[in-house]
Amino acid sequence: MPRILIIDKIHPYLATTLSQQGFDCIDGSAWDKGRYAEEIGNYDGLVIRTKIKVDKEFIDKAINLRFIARAGAGMENIDVAYAESKGITCLSSPEGNRDSVAEHCVAVLLSLMNNILRADKEIRQGLWRRDANWGTELMGKTVGIIGYGYMGPAFAQRLRGFGVTILAHDKYKTGFGDEYITEASIADIYQKADVVSLHLPLTEETQYYASKAFFNSFAKPIYFLNTARGNNVDTLALVDALKAGKVLGAALDVTEYESFSFEALSQADLPAPFKYLANSDNVILTPT
C-alpha cells in the first residue's frame, strides 16, 4: 500500500478520500522538523502547505518519493526543478481556496472603506463617533487587480454587483477582458485605480513588487489589499505610503514576516514596520 505523509493541517476529507483509494495516509502534522527528514525515505507521497522547505537536501533523502502535493497555489517552498529531475511529480491546487480568498477580499475591503473595525472598537469603549467613522462607498470606484490567474478572476466576479470599474493586469496573460473586466496595463492601474489588490505568485520578479516606487506611481490615494504572498510587499514601503496618505487603508492576509513565529515573540521583538501596522486603525491583519 503506497504511503503518504501529510505534514501540515489539511482538511480530513483529503486523507479520507485517499484512504478509500488504497493509500496509507500518515498524519505527521505534530512532528518536529527533524523527524520529517528522518522519515521521508519511507514514503511514496508528501502533502504539504508551508511548514517546511523541500530543498535539494530534503529531496535527496526522499529515496522512494513519487509525488509532492502542495495544498495551495504557490510552489516557492519546493525545489520543483530538482524534484522533477529526480522523477518526483509536483502538484498544486491553485483553485482550492479561490472562493474563500475572493470573499475575504470583499470582506476586508468593505471593512476598510467603512471603518468597521475602528467604529466597533470605539463603541465597545463607550465612544459614539458617527461623523468621524463615515465610510466611503465602493460604488463608482475603480478596482485594479494585479495578477489574473485563479484568485484575480474570482475576486473580480464578486465585485460585479458593486457598480465598480474593474481593471485587471497580468504581465503573462492576455485576452481575458469581457463586459465586466477591462484588460489594462499597469500604467492604466497607476492612473485610475482607487483600490488595488495583489494576486501574484512569489518569484524573483515579484519579490517586493509593491515597493516605494510602486506606491509612488499612483495618481490617487488607494486602498491596498494583499492576499497573495507576504514578500510581494515591501512592508516598510507600505508603512511610508500609509504615513504619507498615499495608501488610505491596507488589508494584509500575509506578511513578509511570516517566517517568524509570532506566538513565541514578545511585542517588543516584532519588527518596527509590523508594529506600526498592528497599531494602525486603517490596517486589517488576518492570518493566512
Image: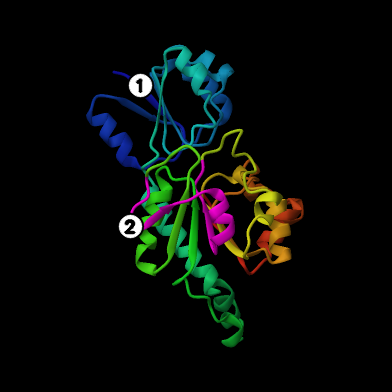
State the residue in front, 142 or 3: 142
Total labels: the figure holds 2
Q: Amino acid at mark 2?
A: Glu
The residues tagged by marks 2 and 1 sit, at their Cα atoms, a distance apart of 48 Å
From which residue to which does the magenta span run? 176-200
Callout 2: SS: loop
| Sequence-wise first label, 2 or 1 | 1
Q: Residue at x 53, y 13 (%)?
A: 60
Asked if 41 appears above or below 107 in the picture, the reply is above
Q: Residue at x 48, y 45 (%)?
A: 147
**Residue 137 falls within the magenta-colored stretch:** no
Residue 42 pos. (x, y %): 43, 16
Residue 138 pos. (x, y %): 47, 71
Mark sitting on residue 3: 1
Asked if 161 appears above or below 90 in the picture, the reply is below
Q: Amino acid at mark 1?
A: Arg
Give the quarter of the figure containing the N terminus: top left
Give neighbour class at mark 2: few <14, some 14-19, many 20+ (Cα, 10 Å).
few
State the residue in front, 152 or 186: 186
Residue holding disc 2:
179
Give neighbour class at mark 1: few <14, some 14-19, many 20+ (Cα, 10 Å).
some
Asked if 4 appears above or below 259 in the picture, the reply is above
